[in-house]
Image (cartoon, rainbow, N blue to C red):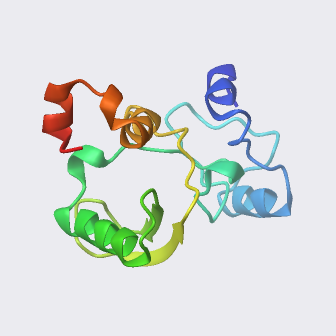
Amino acid sequence: QTRRRLAATGGESAIPMDAETERCLAAAGFGYEDIPAADVSIMVRKTANLHTGGTIHDVTGILHPALIDAAVAAARAIEIPVTGIDFIVKTPTEPDYWFIEANERPGLANHEPQPTAARFIDMLFPQTVPAPVRKALQI
């Protein structure tokens, strides 16, 4: 794990050196001591969680509108103003998804380049947002 990633995630994204990681490496023909070529990606877990070494990719710009609508509908249905909605999707550009869970206390870090924490503060304190921005964001 790079120092930059460690600093950005507070150590949250370290890959556990356990039996599952070793099994996934072995299935790909590698071991802990092997060094793959620079252009080789190896799946080291069957899960994509940040806390087990997963990575985050911002797909906001390519997200299918049906996914946005489904997330908004789920958040409104449970009436929690700030909600993390977890889906599994094959690709963010397609409308198909599987709903996993809704988090009433979603993490606000690790969403770069989206200003998630700033938008949360704007929602809590809309009077601090300049009027033209408030109008554009409809808050």
- Using residue 33 as the reference point, say whether residue 131 is left or right of it: left
Foreground residue among 6 and 65: 65
Figure label count: 0
Residue at the far right: name it.
18
Where is residue 69, by image quadrant?
bottom left
Q: Return the x and y of residue 16 as percentages of the image width and height.
A: 80, 50
Where is residue 95, by image quadrant?
bottom left
- Above or below 61: residue 92: below
At 53% from the left and 38% from the top, the residue drawn is 110
- Above or below 73: residue 33: above
Q: Return the x and y of residue 121 as percentages of the image width and height.
A: 44, 36
At 67% from the left and 24% from the top, the residue drawn is 7
At 64% from the left and 34% from the top, the residue drawn is 9
Where is residue 44, by image quadrant?
bottom right
At 62% from the left and 49% from the top, the residue drawn is 50
Q: Return the x and y of residue 128 as percentages of the image width and height.
A: 34, 26
- Using residue 116 as the reference point, say whether residue 110 is left or right of it: right
- Using residue 115 as the reference point, say whether residue 92 is left or right of it: left
Which quadrant is the N terminus positioned in?
Answer: top right
Which quadrant is the C terminus positioned in?
Answer: top left
Q: Return the x and y of residue 129 as percentages of the image width and height.
A: 29, 28
- Above or below 76: residue 36: above
- Above or below 19: residue 96: below
Foreground residue among 52 and 36: 52
Foreground residue among 88 and 136: 136
